[in-house]
Image: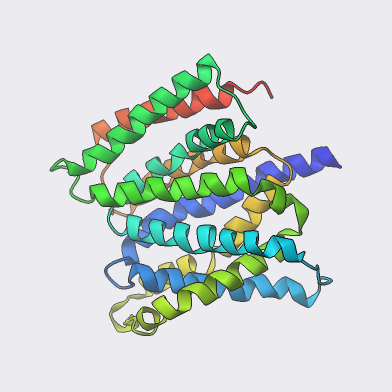
Amino acid sequence: MKNKGVASAHIALIGCNLVWACDYPFYNLLLGRYISPMAMVCGSLIVAAVLSWIPALWQKREQIERSDWPTLIIIALLMGVTRKLLMMFGLSRTSPIDGSIIATISPLLVLLLSVAVGIDRFSTKKIIGLILGGIGAIAVVLTSTTPHHANSELSGNIMMICSGLVTALYMVFFKNLVSKYRITTLLRAMYTISTLAILPFGFKDLINIDFSDMSTPLYLAAAFVLIIPTYLPNLLLNYSLKYLPPAISSTYAYIQPILAVALSVAMGLDKLHADTIIFAVVLFAGVGCVITSYKK
């Protein structure tokens, strides 16, 4: 049964990262042009909160211990609000290619945090991986200041790194709580709290969205990013954390830039530059060193 759960966890990770990979080009189509980042955050959290209550129609209610509520509130503000805001504002100021490549730094951040709290330790291979990954990530971020990277801004790339850091914090520090309750129970609490927290700040932007200038493809893109990427991928990610360690779960971020780059170029939203390819290879090599340092 456990082996079956582990296999399902790997499939879940592939699924959530495929969805997140589609986010980059679709968000790029909409953010700043038709929908503000704050409106996008508010709208997607409202949809996620509604979806999170659907399983309650057939599942028996699970009681959350009173002592766990402060931690759940922190999770909601961290993953539901802070990460989402950083990602939306970051993607509105960077290219989909740069954003998706920077997202692959998560395994390195997970390793650093895991070592810091004593659940992992450094090895020669991991240190080499961290150095290579750090060089690659910094290089991708700094190229946003060069003239031929007109679609990227330094501030946007920094926000994307901060978004990855928030995800790493969640995967390392809150794994035990994820394993304690049903995934649907955890997400229901998280998205309900997140929605209540963001509504006072984002509701005005949300109701002022002008849909009249949007074509049918843009409507479909808006429907996708508002409905799919928030609740479903996090459902799959939290399921994987029940069976797999954070360092392994985070490695599937590799899928995102491959698909995101292909979609962005195919849709004419961005161009793949030679320097970006070189720095991405250095970053991937670093993350690869960290991944292969684990015997299992």
Picture residue at 22% right of the left edge, 38% below the top:
143
Q: Residue furthest top?
A: 124
Picture residue at 32% right of the left edge, 63% below the top:
29
> In this orientation, which residue lies closer to the viewer: 158 or 239?
158
Q: Quadrant of the N terminus?
A: top right
State the image coordinates of residue 221 (x, y, percent, origin top left): 42, 67
State the image coordinates of residue 279 (x, y, percent, origin top left): 32, 30
Query: Is residue 103 in view?
Result: yes
Left or right: 257, with 55 as reference point: left
Please identify the quarter of the rendering in which residue 114 is found. Answer: top right
**74 versus 154 height, above or below:** below
Q: Residue furthest left?
A: 147
Q: Which of the colour schemes (rainbow, by chain, secondary structure, one colour) is used?
A: rainbow
Q: Quadrant of the C terminus?
A: top right
State the image coordinates of residue 196 (x, y, percent, origin top left): 53, 76
> In this orientation, which residue lies closer to the viewer: 19 or 66?
66
Picture residue at 40% right of the left edge, 48% below the top:
162
**295 versus 162 height, above or below:** above
Q: Residue furthest right?
A: 1
Query: Is residue 229 in view?
Result: no
Please identify the quarter of the rendering in which residue 189 is found. Answer: bottom right
**44 versus 290 height, above or below:** below
Please identify the quarter of the rendering in which residue 147 is found. Answer: top left
State the image coordinates of residue 129 (x, y, percent, origin top left): 46, 23
Q: Residue furthest front?
A: 67
**Figure label count:** 0
